[in-house]
Image: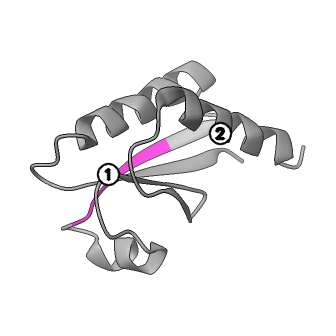
């Protein structure tokens, strides 16, 4: 089962585009069978964002868990995903 990454964005957020780009790059590099990405507009899905504890954009959740409350480096995001892949049951 693929790992699910959600990037929480909001209109006018300068860093949100970079967060979305980092997520899409990883999805392309690792493949959709391994990682699936989804952009979440916080204004449209406020209940979902609040339920995960997101208070500002950009934020990134992995498999329904808020992992980054601000934009991580592409390297840190990749390392976190690779760690999760190693932990995933075969």
Residue beneath the point at 60% across and 38% down = 35
Which residue is nearer to you in this view: 69 or 88?
Answer: 69
Image position of 25 with respect to 85: above or below: above
Q: What residue is disc 2 on? A: 81
* The image quarter in which residue 19 lies: top left
Dominant SS of magenta comes to strand
Whole-percent x, y for residue 59 in the image: 39, 55
Q: Name the residue: 17% across, 41% down.
A: 14
The residue at 72%/48% (across/down) is 1
Q: Residue at x 56, y 64 (%)?
A: 64
| Extreme residue toward the left, this view | 12
Position of residue 24 measured from the top left corner of the image (x, y, whole percent): 42, 30
Tell me if 71 is positioned left or right of 64 in this view: left
Residue 74's x, y, as percent? 49, 28
In the picture, measured across the screen, residue 85 lies left or right of residue 5, that is: right
Give the SS element for disc 2: helix
Magenta residue span: 37-42
Where is mark 1, residue-wise?
A: 58
């Amino acid at each position: 089962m693929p790992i699910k990454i959600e990037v929480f964005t909001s209109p006018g957020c300068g860093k949100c585009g970079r967060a979305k780009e980092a997520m899409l790059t990883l999805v392309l590099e690792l493949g959709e069978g391994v990682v699936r990405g989804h952009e979440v507009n916080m204004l449209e899905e406020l209940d979902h964002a609040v339920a995960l504890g997101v208070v500002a954009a950009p934020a990134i959740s992995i498999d329904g868990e808020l992992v980054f409350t601000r934009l991580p480096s592409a390297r840190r995001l990749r390392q976190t995903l690779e760690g999760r892949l190693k932990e995933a049951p075969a």
